[in-house]
Image: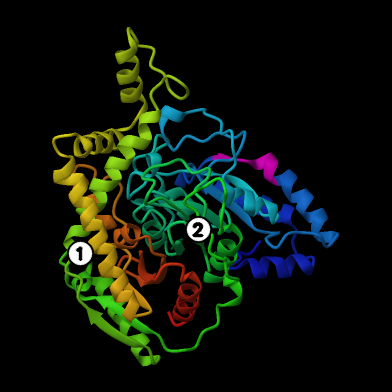
Amino acid sequence: MKSYHTLDEIQKDIRLGKISCKALVEHYLSNIKVHSDLNAFVEVYSSEALQRADIVDVRIKENRAGKLAGLIFGIKDLICFQDHKISGASKILQNFESQITATAVEKLLQEDAILIGRQNCDEFGMGSSNENSYYGPVKNALDQSKVAGGSSGGSAVAIQADMCQISLGTDTGGSVRQPAAFCGIVGLKPTYSRISRWGLLAYASSFDSIGIFSKSIEDNARVLEVIAGKDERDGTSSSKTVPAYSQELESKKPFKVAYLREALETEALQPEIKTAIETQISNLKAAGHTVESVEFPLLDYILPTYYILTTAEVSSNLSRYDGVRYGHRSSAVSDLESLYKNSRTEGFGAEARKRIMLGTFVLSADYYDAYFTKAQKARKLIKVATEKILSEYDFIIIPTTPTTAFKLGEHTKSPIEVYMADLFTVQASISGLPALSIPVGNDDNGMPIGLQIIAAAFEEGKLFAFSKNLIQTI
């Protein structure tokens, strides 16, 4: 079976009788088996997906199928599916079964999309390489000696290696956009609150967003218009009307685009990425868009601000995993203190323990004002400065990542080097703005390069239209 680029192509062939949902599921199940060495999936719902495909095929024949019939998707192991395991790629939740289904998953299923399995990730979303998983690292399908990116590495590789058509990941500081760039696919982090977080295991609640991986802008738009919207179970979800994104993809008007001078001048940027971004800037100018350099002197403060705030939030959020109510409980217990201490030490991986400790430190009475309070003030400054640029320009374009995919184990001894992979993605996360990564070429070793496009809050429609037009010129 051919590899489909868009759901439109799939649905056209279904109408013509060339394929069926069941045949599609069988195709993807075969690919998952062939590419099992990539470690993208931690659990595959083979029999359920096939049964569901039979039901959807009947609905298609009876002309009562949902708008996403024929869409096969996977979910990151941080997104709940009732009566199925969810672990956050952590030992501390090994074999735990979810009591609920995430709203985003629920909405896809209601439109007859078919869920094929849950996908590997960094533990509780903490990582930029997918090497911090209890289930082992995910490998890049283009070069298995290199990382897939994180934390949603399994979700990205599942699209990259044609194991499903769509993946739902999560993006706290770049965990959809960064692996999308490393794998050469499309990755969206929507405006914070655009998609309900109900059924998402929390990492940093004021940053976490469910995001979408796809092969095309069209599919990303179709999925967002289904899963976005107000959810009474999530008090942070937006009540703003959800546009028909997939109907607003044609836009030929010239846009005003800014790029951050500091981002292209930093020594951390790989030369091939700089060249690729500069080429895109030239292409945009040639196409009639206004493209101008702007200064963003707060760039050096973005990563420290992000890591102070997210570690503080993870310290609070992960306190619920204590060995008392559910999840891993240590057998080496003599009293209540040893139950807490040993269960958490055994259950959490090294990166999770480190971030919990850092967060506990910055929230402590002696250091709260020195770190957490200052970081909150810095967050506001970064948000205001970013929004000011977007009040004058339609978009900000910057590299998605400072380097292309690096070798497995290359940065494990230096966490700062791994954290630097988030250098360009955390700005949109701190500001709560939508951002999209699209592929714009390859480096000298054939590894993909990503361009990140940031728009004003709730401007996903304009973001899709601009990106579709841009991606056609690559």
In the depicted view, which residue is nearer to us: 357 or 165? 357
Q: Position of residue 42 (x, y in %)?
A: 51, 39
Real-space CA distance between mark 2 and mark 1, rounded to the nearest whole angstrom: 28 Å
- Residue beneath disc 2: 238
Q: Position of residue 183 (x, y in %)?
A: 41, 60
336 over 200 or under it: above or below: above
In the depicted view, which residue is nearer to us: 45 or 410? 45
Q: Kindly identify the residue that appears in the image at 34 percent across and 54 percent down.
A: 173
Question: Which residue type does callout 1 highlight?
Answer: Leu
Q: Is residue 182 visible?
A: yes
- Residue beneath disc 1: 299
Point out the stretch of residues depicted in magenta: 43-49
Question: Which residue type does callout 2 highlight?
Answer: Ser
Q: Kindly identify the residue that appears in the image at 19 percent across and 34 percent down.
A: 364
255 over 142 or under it: above or below: below
Q: Is residue 151 magenta?
A: no
